[in-house]
Structure formats: C-alpha cells, structure tokens
Image: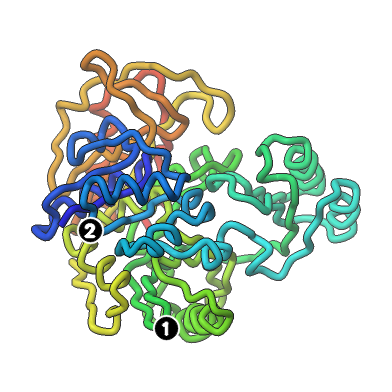
Amino acid sequence: MNILILGSGGREHALAWAVKQNPKCDRLIVAPGNAGIADVAECAALDMLDGAAVVSFCAENAVDFLIVGPEAPLAAGVADAARAAGILTFGPSAAAARLEASKAFTAAYAHFTDAAAARAYVTAQGAPIVIKADGLAAGKGVVVAMTLAEGLAAIDDMFGGALGTAGAEVVVEEFMQGEEASFFILTDGTHALPIGTAQDHKRVGDGDTGPNTGGMGAYSPAPVLTDAIMAQAMAEIVQPTIAEMARRGTPYQGVLYAGLMIADGRARLVEYNARFGDPECQVLMMRLGAQALDLMLACAEARLDRAQVQWADDHALCVVMAAKGYPGSYAKGSVIGNLDQLPEDSRHMVFHAGTAADHGQITATGGRVLGVTARGDTLAAAQKAAYAMVDTIDWPGGFCRRDIGWRAL
C-alpha cells in the first residue's frame, strides 16, 4: 500500500522508520519530512495544515493510508477532510483533538483571558502551581511554578506574547505530587488497546533542572506504570473518556496519550495529547517496529478488538541533542558530523527532528535536532548504547543531558 505521513520531526522519522519495515508498505511519503526522513521515505513539499491540498495530494499519489503526526494538522481538521474524501486515516477529528488543543477541555482548572485576574488568582492560591497556555505550544506551554514569583512571571510571559497566540488564554491548575509517566492507548472510537508506556525528561538540565522544553529524552517502558496502575487508569480514566467522547458525537480515533501522575499506587490524569509524544514516540517505535503499521491500520479500520501488541522484553532510551541555547534563542545552520559513523539497525537509530541536507552535509535547523535512540536487554544497556552514539557525533553547536533514565536507574 501507499502511505503518507504528515510531519517533519523526530516523531515522524520514528513512525516512518517503523512503517517502512512492514511488508505491507510499498511506497512511503512523508510531507514535508527532513534530512533523516529522506533516508527511509520520499519527502514531499506539502502544506500539512491545508486539508484540501492534502486530499488532492493523496488522490494524485494513490495514497491508501494517511497517518497524521503532529497536533497542528489535527486541530486544523486535516483528518476530517481526508475521511470525508474516503481516505483511510489515522488521527482524531478536529472536534476530538480538542482534548489536546484546549487544556481547558480536560482538567480541573481556572481559565483566564486577562493577566490581572490570573495574577490575582495565583497570588491567592500560592505555589507550587501549574500555569498552562490554553493553545497549542508544541509541548512548551506549561510552567510548573515552584514559587509565586515564577508563577506570576509565567503569566506575564504568556499574556505578553512569548508563546504567540497559544498564550492568549491561560489555564491555572493545581500542582500534583507524584511521579509523572506517559501512557499510550490506541482507540477506534469504541475499543481501546494499550500500546506502551514511557517517561520523558522535560527540563533542559541534568537532575531535571532549568526551564521546561519539548522533551530532552525518554525511555520505555516506565517502571512506575505497573500492570495494576495501568488497569486502574484504563478503568477509571481512559475508558470513561472514550465513552464520553462517543456520547458527545465526537468519537476519538487515533492514539490517546495520557499524561498521568502516579502517587500512592494510583494514577491521576494530568492532561491528554492527541498524538504520539516526542521523544516518547522514538522509544515506542524502536520497541514496536513493523507491527506499528498493523496496529494503526487496525485502529483506522475499527477492528482494534481483534488486535494484539507483541512486546519484546526489552528497553529503549532516547537522548535528545539540541542546539546550544535551547529552549531560548539558538543559532541555526551548524554542521553535524560523524553521523555516517553510527550503527543504524533495529537496536540503534538516530531520529532527525530539526535537520536539513546542505551540499552533502547535515545541518541543524531547529532547537531539538536529533533523537539518539538505542534498545537494550536492560535500561542500563540501552542508556550505555545511546550515549556511546552521542559521544561519536561531532557537533560542537549542540548539547544534551547526560542523565536520561536516571529515575528508573
């Protein structure tokens, strides 16, 4: 079959890498793609937010299956346009994707359109407290303020335009104590199938210090999500959500990424995302491999009740290499060397997030640039292999955390 994946980041490189391994995949196109994706798929210039353009492209290229990677095209209704045109599609409708597109849709919260009112509320509540931009901010619109000053500064930044239109409205939530983990579930609108767990490292510095980022690394599985806690999360959080979405006439079809806070042997919902996480997708795809396509097809074709996940008893770990200065201002265009010296196989992979090919060289074009990922029989082995790859890469303009996986190790 001919398959189109929308996106240009590390998540989409990981999806493409897994899908390409499946013999059902005859032709793979990623739009717009990046320099690393070009090694496993055709890259196409296409406005992934333009549903009509995506539908036309699918018709011109006889696309049998569309996989929508990032949140922005989901919120823009691209999956709706594709389904209306009869294209088999993986990814929720715009109405269902509101689970992510508006933080106010899920959590117990206070919602503000005025900075003064938000400041007064936070001052009254005190710290620690969580401040969230109510729009899509590519994973960077959340500040866990441990002091009142941090909370007020976050409100001023968001209403001051630091996140563009995403911060025009702000949600303030309680601070939850516990350990955070990510739970990934496929749902076809009726049935649900858990497909993996992960933990990521949001803060930029070792020891989980410094500002939040889109994610500096991840590992799978997440030891804190035991079988008992996953069963509780499915029964009390996930299944009721799926049933309620269907009751509202907006059935959810695609991957449901539940951010959970674990404390005292129980999970509480922090937030939902309507797509695979990044870099969590990289470690999930390393462990799922070719079956990822079969599972996404079962989801899109509403036959998840007959699908099963075949898990290897192993671990995967991803170290994100970012441009120096990230998550603040950073330079673009620095050259990344020695990528051709690395093993790339089912246990070692560098997923490109922000790269371009320039006269035979790979250059950095984004903040988070590479996801250096390895599998191992143990988490310690996966960590050792990933950092051995990191140490081979010659990129003076980049940096990474050196402690990915520390919670579990």
Which residue shows up at 56% across the image and 82% down it?
244
Which residue shows up at 23% across the image and 53% down it?
63
Q: Quadrant of residue 86?
A: bottom left
Q: Is residue 309 above or below residue 397?
A: below
Which residue shows up at 14% across the image and 55% down it?
25
N-term-proximal mark, 1 vs 2: 2
Q: Quadrant of the N terminus?
A: bottom left
Q: Is residue 300 above or below residue 28?
A: below
Residue 22, image x and y in percent?
13, 58
- The residue singled out by tag 1 in the image is 231
Residue 409, image x and y in percent?
36, 56
Task: Give me the C-alpha separation between circle 1 and circle 2.
Answer: 35 Å
- The residue singled out by tag 2 in the image is 64
Residue 107 circle label = none
Residue 403, image x and y in percent?
41, 43
Report the front residue among 61 and 98.
61
Q: Secondary structure at mark 2?
A: loop
